[in-house]
């Protein structure tokens, strides 16, 4: 067989996406294939810029094509195009400009939900995603403090313009002064605010919109589920409260609301010494993994207890900005990659028919 397009594609079928369990040709990832006097060029378009195995896929693709007779060189370009995993319906139209809505929740307050949401959002942006954030804590917004962002939202005459910090777009009740509130926000408070955060903000080209859910009864989760199609929820736990019951309750609640659980993050899972970076498993190891396993949801990562995470939150410089190469910073970046991979997996699933929420 001479060197032609189908020979190259046939060879590339040997390269499998480890998350999607299919080859990159079947998945439609191979683009712009050119063959010029034995030089083969193509683009692999992944579904996430934060792909943990990007380099591995590139190398595999290069290797299988290089083996073909007549090939003198291989040029592989890696790009990404985030797919949407949230399909709207009549009651819950997708938000224009937003591909994936990711909710960050927990069975309990105080487990580090906001800390995780903020660092994950920035980590996704650092990996090349276009990221936005909604502070779902209407009555006690913490996101502005953790981002070190004191500002007021403005409108472009038509829509609300989100604030920006660390490469992410963000809206929060904390950006509304008491005086502004009645002007911009009309209608019943909580549900109205959530709807307006989605519908009346000028969101532009957002791959991942992270919403920090407040602790409590699930009012905001309910509003969210009634307002937009949600790609999935990340559930944050801690080893001290790795109470199966709490986390299971949260997962069940999202299930009822038709929000799949993208995975579990174990926060404050082990201790990292701020001065010597020594890591110790003071709570034992593997609690998060086994909890995830027993709930049949993916495990997205373990974040250490690390004083600079707390300090970073207090001074508005999140750890992924301040110490991206520390064990804690790397833990968030890797959790972000796994989150992006789960969103990508979800985008290939058949949409669950949305049933009305009562
Ligand atoms: N991994 C961590 N290491 C150290 N402190 C943390 C960590 N995660 C959260 N914190 C701190 O714990 C407190 C509660 O976190 P927060 O994100 O506000 O929780 P929640 O949103 O669940 O109520 C904050 O002071 C925060 O800085
Ligand atoms: Mg919070």
Image: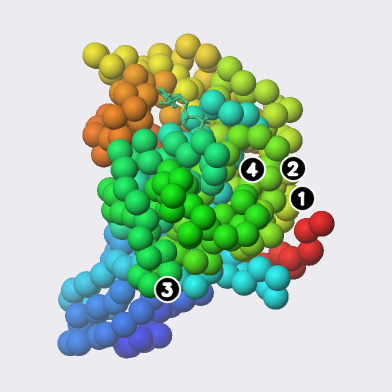
Q: Which residue is mark 2?
A: 252
**Residue 172: image location, x then y, percent:** 45, 48
Calculate the distance from the C-alpha at mark 4 to the C-alpha at mark 3: 41 Å
User: Going 36% across and 36% down the picture, which residue do you hit?
Assistant: 145
- Residue furthest to the right in view is 358
Disc nearer the start of the sequence (1/4): 1
Q: Which residue is mark 1?
A: 256
Q: Tags 2 and 1 in contact by the CB under 8 Å rule? A: yes
Disc nearer the start of the sequence (4/3): 3
Q: Tags 4 and 2 in contact by the CB under 8 Å rule? A: no
Looking at the image, residue 253 sits to the left or right of residue 287; the answer is right
Q: Which residue is mark 4?
A: 297
**Residue 16: image location, x then y, percent:** 46, 62
User: Going 62% across and 23% down the picture, which residue do you hit?
Assistant: 242
In the picture, the quarter occupied by the C terminus is: bottom right
Looking at the image, residue 143 sits to the left or right of residue 308; the answer is right
Under circle 1, the secondary element is helix
Disc nearer the start of the sequence (4/2): 2
Q: Which residue is mark 3?
A: 158
Calculate the distance from the C-alpha at mark 1 to the C-alpha at mark 3: 35 Å
Question: Does the beta carbon of the residue at mark 2 sit less than 8 Å from ligand 1?
Answer: no
Q: Nearer the viewer, mark 1 or mark 4?
A: 1
Under circle 3, the secondary element is loop
């Amino acid at each position: 067989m001479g060197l032609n397009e189908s020979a190259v594609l046939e060879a590339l079928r040997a390269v499998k996406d480890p998350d999607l369990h299919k080859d990159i040709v079947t998945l439609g990832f191979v683009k712009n294939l050119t063959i010029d006097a034995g030089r083969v060029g193509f683009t692999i378009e992944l579904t996430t810029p934060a792909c943990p195995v990007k380099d591995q896929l590139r190398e595999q693709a290069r290797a299988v094509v290089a083996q073909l007779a007549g090939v003198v060189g291989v040029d592989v370009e890696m790009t990404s195009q985030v797919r949407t995993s949230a399909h709207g319906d009549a009651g819950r139209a997708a938000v224009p400009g937003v591909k994936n809505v990711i909710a960050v929740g927990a069975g309990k307050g105080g487990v580090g939900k906001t800390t995780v949401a903020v660092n994950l959002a920035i980590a996704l942006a650092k990996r090349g995603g276009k990221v936005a954030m909604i502070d779902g804590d209407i009555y006690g917004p913490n996101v502005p403090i953790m981002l070190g962002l004191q500002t007021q939202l403005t409108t472009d005459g038509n829509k609300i313009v989100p604030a920006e910090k660390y490469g992410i777009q963000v809206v929060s009740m904390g950006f509304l002064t008491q005086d502004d509130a009645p002007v911009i926000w009309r209608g019943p408070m909580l549900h109205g605010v959530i709807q307006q955060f989605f519908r009346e903000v000028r969101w532009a080209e957002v791959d991942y919109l992270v919403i920090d859910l407040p602790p409590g009864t699930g009012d905001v989760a309910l509003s969210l589920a009634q307002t937009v199609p949600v790609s999935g929820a990340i559930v944050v736990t801690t080893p001290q409260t790795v109470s199966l019951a709490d986390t299971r309750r949260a997962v069940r609640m999202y299930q009822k609301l038709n929000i799949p659980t993208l995975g579990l993050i174990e926060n404050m899972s082990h201790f990292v010494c701020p001065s010597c970076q020594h890591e110790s498993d003071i709570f034992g190891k593997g609690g998060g993994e086994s909890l995830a396993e027993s709930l049949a949801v993916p495990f997205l990562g373990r974040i250490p207890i690390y004083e600079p995470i707390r300090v970073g939150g207090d001074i508005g410089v999140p750890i992924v900005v301040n110490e991206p190469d520390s064990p804690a910073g790397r833990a968030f970046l890797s959790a972000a990659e796994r989150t992006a991979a789960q969103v990508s997996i979800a985008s290939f699933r058949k949409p669950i028919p949305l049933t009305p929420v009562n």
